[in-house]
Image: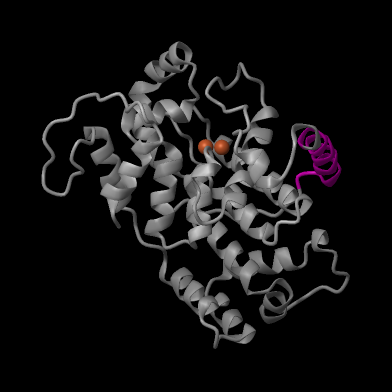
Amino acid sequence: MDYNKIAQSAWAIFPDGYERLNTPPAKPGETPGATPELNRILASVGRLRPLPGNVTRLLRAIDDPATTAGMVADYLLLDQALTAYILRVANSAQLGYSKPCASPKDAVMRLGFKQVKALVLSTVAAGPLTRRLTGYRLGSGELWQHSISTATRARWLAQAVSFNAPEEAYVAGLLHDMGKLLMDQFILSDYPRILEMMEAKKLFFWQVEGRLFGIDHAGVGGLMAERWSFPPNLQEAIRCHHAPGQSQAQQKLAALVNVADTFSNLETSPQSRPGKNREIHPDSLPILNLDERSLARMYEIMNKALAEMGNVYLAPDVQDDTL
Ligand SMILES: [Fe+2]
Ligand SMILES: [Fe+2]
């Protein structure tokens, strides 16, 4: 992984430079000019455990054009929780099938390889997202709730704008803030200072992260996704969810997550979470071919539809052992 290149591109987001805390000469393996925090953040990405073997084997099989639905089902059967999850989604009322599907092979055929892949990826970092993040002042389960809410909204919006991969939007929404898992320890002592800087410089929380550390949680999430060899679209949607115009591979996906994230934050009170981003990035509207009026209408219809649906969209059973 080319940390230098990625770190530099993260800095490029802030043309007036980040707040250099203290940048001693780089040691071997460190990024020259980076803050000690950035070097530590990059090192913690480098230390991430690889994905479990059954997940990588399954993902590799799905990408192989010679693989059949039966073969994917055989790989799935090696993981009970994953099999149960895929069956649950394939039988969910939301997909509108009247006939239940009983076998994993039927489920794979019904959902298609692309959707199975998205669902497998969504289980990867889901467990740790339920953790309490002391640095971000998020109680246990709070980031998980926000992630599910963003994922559900991203999927709904994807369908509303006829985006061809709504499941990908769901996964991108679910994992968009996973960089916070690694950033949390660095935010901990700097939190009051971040709030001060937000106020003084009229910046969003993620922008202050970039200024202080040389990388924000979106950039860190992008590095984690790269480390785990997620599909490039997904890597970029995570990396660019606060600045969709920066995405090279798939701006639409990043813009869908940006809008879904903001809509999800609008459901919480501003006082309860001062750092939450409540503004859609100006790039998102032209990328999605929407104007403000149609977006406002969509917000209303979406909230109504989600309220009617209840909180039924399916999330994986989570186990907090991936990181
Ligand atoms: Fe974020
Ligand atoms: Fe978010």
Q: Where 36 falls versus 81 (above or below)?
A: above
Q: Which SS type dominates the magenta stretch?
A: helix
Residue 271 is a magenta residue: no
Q: Does residue 33 show up? A: yes
* Left or right for 302, reference 287: right
Q: Looking at the image, which residue is at 49% across and 44% down? A: 246
The stretch of residues the image draws in magenta is: 295-311
Which image quadrant for residue 229? Answer: bottom left
Instruction: Choose between 272 and 167: the one closer to the eye.
Output: 167
The residue lying toward the viewer, choosing from 270 and 83, is 270
Residue 168 position, x and y percent, is: 62, 58
Splitting the image into 4 quarters, where does residue 19 fall?
Answer: top left
Number of numbered discs: 0
Q: Which residue is drawn at 39% across and 44% down?
A: 220
Of the pair 34 and 317, the residue shown nearer to us: 34
* 28 lies above or below 139: below
| Residue at image point 75% right, 36% down | 291
Residue 263, percent from left and from top: 69, 34
